[in-house]
Amino acid sequence: NTGHIGDSNYMLDQRYCHRLSSSTIARQVIAEFINNNLSDKYELILSEFYEKNHLQIIGDTFLLNRMLTNLIRNSFIHNPNGCHITVSINQDTNFCIFSIEDTGQGVDIYTLEHLNKNGFIRNPDNTEHGLGLKIVNQIVHLHHGKIKFSANKPHGLIVQISLPRDFTSMPRK
């Protein structure tokens, strides 16, 4: 069953999954922000920490771009006075690890716990806040990955996404 990314029944269409350079995905997203007149209040940089020239993953380019775009945009939205944002790419044996770190105001412990449990925040009136994060969570899940939110010391937020380098051979959940 396929549908819209916001639908709980959405399944990743294998026709759109290709071997991709993680670095190319991150560079495209960062370039898009810079080319659209990034405010001087923000510094946006890419750091790559892996030995091989290209850390490749299998995934949907559009969705992975959307995932990184939503996370970087959240740093802008929640830090209107500016901050430094670093997008890092690393690897371990079977995973590509994207980290989005900012030096902004961060979030409290309750919010961190809630984000790590649900991937988004509910407002006091029980409506969802953070639809962008919910979509990020869905994209990570579709790619059989994991997402973790943590505090960036002394202040700010770190979002770490671990995606299997080849989820097509993994058993379906």
Image: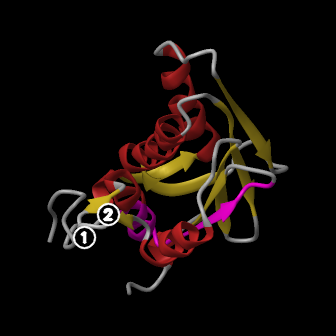
As helix, strand or loop, the secondary structure at mark 2 comes to loop
Report the coloring of the rendering: secondary structure
Q: Which residue is mark 2?
A: 123
Quadrant of the image occupied by residue 163: bottom right
Amino acid type for the residue under numbered disc 1: Asn
| Circle 1/circle 2 CB separation < 8 Å | yes
Residue range of the region highlighted in magenta in the rendering: 137-153
Q: Is residue 52 above or below residue 127?
A: above
User: Of helix, strand and loop, which one carries label 1?
Assistant: loop
Residue 148 on image: x %, y %? 60, 68
Q: Residue at x 68, y 71 (%)?
A: 94
Q: Residue at x 57, y 68 (%)?
A: 112
Residue 44 screen position, x and y as percent: 66, 29
Q: Distance of mark 1 from mark 2, alpha carbons?
A: 5 Å
In which image quadrant can residue 93 be found? bottom right
| In-front residue for pair 98/12 | 98
Q: Position of residue 45 (x, y in %)?
A: 70, 31
Write the residue at 50% across / 45% down: 68
Q: Nearer the viewer, residue 85 or 139?
A: 85
Q: Which kind of residue does numbered mark 2 sit on? A: Asn
Q: Residue 7 at what x, y percent from top left? A: 18, 65
Q: Nearer the viewer, residue 19 or 70?
A: 70
Where does label 1 land, which residue?
126
Left or right of 64, for residue 57: right
Is the C terminus in the top left, top right, bottom left or bottom right quadrant?
A: bottom left
- Most extreme residue toward the front is 124
Q: Quadrant of the N terminus?
A: bottom left
